[in-house]
Amino acid sequence: MGSVGSPGDTVGSMHVKNEAHDDDIEGDWSGTVIDAAQMRRDPKVEHEVERIETLRGSIDNLDGAMVAILAERFRATDEIGHAKAAAGFGPEDPEREREQASRLRDLAEHAGLDAGIARRYMEFVVSEAKRRHQEIAEGRVGR
Ligand SMILES: O=C(O)C(=O)C[C@]1(C(=O)O)C=C[C@@H](O)C=C1
């Protein structure tokens, strides 16, 4: 059993709710909804619950910053998409992508980020950018 309570356990006087997800890939990822107000009163878990709440505050701030940064990135790649369409270039530049992948791998290593996470992030944003380039070229995305 984990220190915060595993799904289906009873923590103190209170049941830890299960919320199984249909899209679970492997193992038992069934949800544990933390009712913080209630759990904070349980001395067995209050420390962990407070820590989780503090970290969730940081995560909310970071997610907000990530969304703002992604919006800025897609504004830039959309501009490139318009320029490529105007010049008659295709959406993809594999040489540029190789440089980006290598640069991100180095950055991830220095930042202590798993290289696979950096690679999947890059694959996601670049494939979305190319999809939008294609839509721009077809006149389906305006400025
Ligand atoms: O730099 C470009 O040429 C872009 O179109 C931007 C971008 C990216 O999202 O960073 C997208 C597609 C290319 O294959 C390479 C990079």
Image: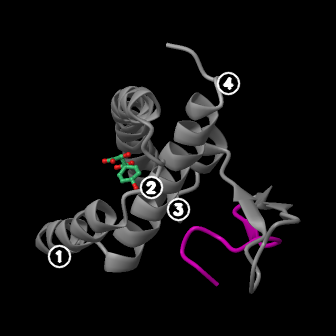
Disc assigned to residue 126: none
Kind of residue sitting beneath label 4: Arg
Which residue is under mark 2?
A: 92
In 3D space, how far apart are the residues under numbered discs 4 and 3 (Cα atoms)?
A: 53 Å
**Crowding near pointer 1: few (<14 within 10 Å), some, many (20+)?**
few
- Which residue is located at x 38 percent, y 33 percent? 87
Residue 78 picture quarter: top left
Which tag, 2 or 4, sits closer to the chain's start?
2
Which tag, 4 or 1, sits closer to the chain's start?
1
Q: Is residue 51 shown above or below 68?
A: below
Which tag, 4 or 3, sits closer to the chain's start?
3
Question: Residue 139 appears at what percent x and percent y?
Answer: 64, 23
Question: Residue 80 appears at what percent x and percent y?
Answer: 36, 33
Closer mark to the observer between disc 3 and disc 1? 1
The residue closer to the viewer here, 133 or 71, is: 133
Disc assigned to residue 140: 4
Kind of residue sitting beneath label 3: Val
Residue furthest top as drawn: 143
Q: Is residue 48 shown above or below 63?
A: below
In 3D space, how far apart are the residues under numbered discs 4 and 1 (Cα atoms)?
A: 38 Å
Residue segment shown in magenta: 1-12
